Image: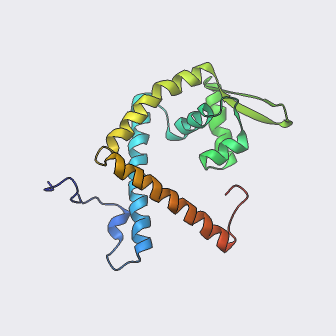
């Protein structure tokens, strides 16, 4: 066991492939990927184990909870960062289970708006505190100041990524 809470515990993941001589950007990317994967896997297990659902279903409910009037399918897809095809199948299953409904979009009759049902709101409300508690536990080793600094640094990174895409001419209309 490490002598201090800050001493690294060896974890076998993509980050272990990085070497000290590798480019710093590569090492940072691999570390972020390792952390993101660890968190995602933990939350995936949590929602499956306690609520018998999947992370994409949880994410869809979360996005719809933040949009009380509902979302167009394309907007839901964009917010979830998945293809329209993935969202179509996911929404169809959520409709069958009574967690969401699809209604005609008043501004575009060819499109539909997806929104939470009362059952969907109740299901998401039951999952939210458990999800938040798990994240608090996962981040408990970091103090508030560290988390605020990390949030700011990740904001800087996000802007840098956006700027890099713009510079390379790689921006999509949704970026």
Measuring from the top left, give residue 133's x and y in whole percent: 37, 34
Residue 165 in sight from this viewpoint: yes
In this picture, is 97 found above or below 78? above
For the point 65% across and 35% down, which residue is it? Answer: 91
Q: Which image quarter is the C terminus in?
A: bottom right
Tell which of 69 and 55 is nearer to you. 69
Q: How is the image coloured?
A: rainbow
For the point 33% across and 75% down, which residue is it? Answer: 19
Measuring from the top left, give residue 158's x and y in whole percent: 54, 60
Q: Is residue 46 left or right of residue 71?
A: left
**Tally of marks:** 0
Q: Is residue 81 left or right of residue 146?
A: right
In this picture, is 66 found above or below 83? above
Tell which of 118 and 90 is nearer to you. 118
Q: Examine the image and state in which quarter residue 2 appears.
A: bottom left
For the point 40% across and 55% down, which residue is it? Answer: 149
Residue 37 in sight from this viewpoint: no
Measuring from the top left, give residue 55's x and y in whole percent: 50, 40
Q: Which image quarter is the N terminus in?
A: bottom left
């Amino acid at each position: 066991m490490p002598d201090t809470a800050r001493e690294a515990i060896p974890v076998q993941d993509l980050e272990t492939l990085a070497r000290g001589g590798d480019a710093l950007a590569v090492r940072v990317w691999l570390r972020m990927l390792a952390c993101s994967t660890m968190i995602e896997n933990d939350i995936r297990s949590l929602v499956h184990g306690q609520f018998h659902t999947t992370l994409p279903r949880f994410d869809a409910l979360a996005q719809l909870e933040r949009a009380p009037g509902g979302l167009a399918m394309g907007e839901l897809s964009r917010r979830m960062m998945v293809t329209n095809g993935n969202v179509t199948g996911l929404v169809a299953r959520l409709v069958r289970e009574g967690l969401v409904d699809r209604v005609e979009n008043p501004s575009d009759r060819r499109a539909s708006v997806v929104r939470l049902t009362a059952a969907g709101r109740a299901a998401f409300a039951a999952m939210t505190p458990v999800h938040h508690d798990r994240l608090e536990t996962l981040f408990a080793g970091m103090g508030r100041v560290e988390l605020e600094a990390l949030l700011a640094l990740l904001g800087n990174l996000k802007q840098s990524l956006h700027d890099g895409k713009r510079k390379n001419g790689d921006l999509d209309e949704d970026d």
